[in-house]
Image (tube, rainbow, N blue to C red):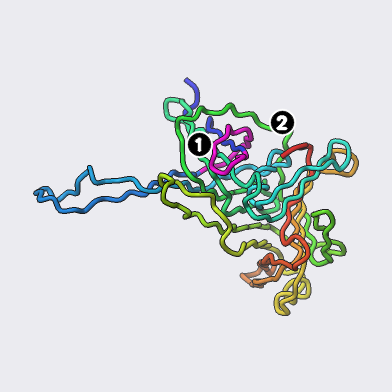
Amino acid sequence: MGFASGLISQLGWAVETTAGTAVTVNKFQPHKSESIQFQVNRKQGEGIYGGTSAFPLASRHQLTTKGVTGDIEVELTDKGMGTLWRAALGSTTTPGVVSGSAYEAVFAPGDGKSAGSSLTVQAGRPQTDGTVKPFSWTGCKITKFEFGGGIDDTLTAKFGIDGWTEATSTSLATASYVTGAVQFTGAQLSINVGGTASTTSGKTTISGGTALTGVKSVTVKGENPLATDRIYAGASGVKAEQLINGWRKYEITLDMDFISQATLYDLFTANTTTALQLTWATTTAITGSNYPTLEVTASACKITNADVNVAGVDLTNQKVTFEVLNDGTNNPFQIRTVSTDTTL
């Protein structure tokens, strides 16, 4: 008898052509956890029926509306992540060749309705008899994301999911993982602060930034406000497509040594707008000087926290939080990848 634990679980997803219409999952990534749950709202009739048991009637217990919510956490690698980044930011993109087999993809915030914003997600959950049972969810939108870690950590990414409904009768897809994928680590991180943002052909770049030293860990968080309660008559309790209904909130937090007051603390007290760029790049080139890369660009940030604390005899620590805002010209937030993925 083989394994019967989470060791034989799997997680996959696929881009839906029409939001809420199931497709066969075709993207797989080694995952750390998934917590997606099917939620069904129930109502109990409370009419008095002259009984003596003081229990409500089972026949008056009714299902009303339904939905799906939870998280998935996957290893953050240089390949195979494109459809998740596209769904997380809500805009379309097509990888373009940089040189040879190196391809670049640029992801920026969009309206969340474009092709690729909605996913079918499937998890294979093992029973104790070793049978892996398929749980499939349609109409999945990414409500939030978080990734990063310490310098000695491997990177993972967690995505919050809101979906329409669940199916357990769909066949378990055969998992096929991208070969040659390399996991990013904190040791590959470099950070630039300041500089001037400019955008050409939809890609924002930063020139003149200054390398930031002393950073021990970084966390990138994004919240996508969505109307997740669009449930109307005639839909059998299933929601309509989730649409953006508020301001996005994206933050980048650095845990670092207190290197210099002027570097970040003075920007905080003066409420200075600054650019920030994080780059993870592996050490083995795809071709020439093109390395597998994950780059985060925020063209206009305000530092909302820059706490400096002395907690004993160790080096003074500083925790700095950048809030991502819009300068009206450039991509407020951008993820750029360089990999051998020719398509998302």
Q: Is residue 286 above or below residue 149?
A: above
Q: Which residues are magenta?
A: 15-34
Q: Which three-letter amino acid code belongs to the residue tagged 1?
A: Ser
Task: From the top left corner, tell me how far across and down residue 172 is, in percent.
Answer: 52, 28
Image coordinates of residue 98 in percent, x first then y, are 86, 43
The answer to whether residue 5 is visible is no
Query: Which numbered dot is residue 179?
Result: 2
Total tally of numbered discs in the picture: 2
Question: On the rendered structure, is 204 left or right of 86?
Answer: right
Residue found farthest to the bottom: 270
Furthest-right residue in view? 288
- Counting other residues with Cα less than 10 Å from the Cα at mark 1, is it few (<14), some (14-19), or many (20 or more)? many
- Most common SS among magenta residues: loop
**Image position of 123 with respect to 302: above or below:** above
Between label 1 and label 2, give the one nearer the viewer: 1
Which residue is located at x 72 percent, y 45 percent? 184
Q: Position of residue 249 (x, y in %)?
A: 62, 63
- Which of 282/201 is in front? 201
- SS type, badge 1: strand
Q: Is residue 55 left or right of residue 78?
A: left
> Going 87% across and 64% down the picture, which residue do you hit?
208
Amino acid marked by disc 2: Thr
Q: Residues within 10 Å of mark 2 (few under 14, many from 20)?
A: few
Q: Which residue is mark 1?
A: 136
Q: Secondary structure at mark 2?
A: loop
Q: Quadrant of residue 277?
A: bottom right
Q: Earlier in the sequence, mark 1 or mark 2?
A: 1
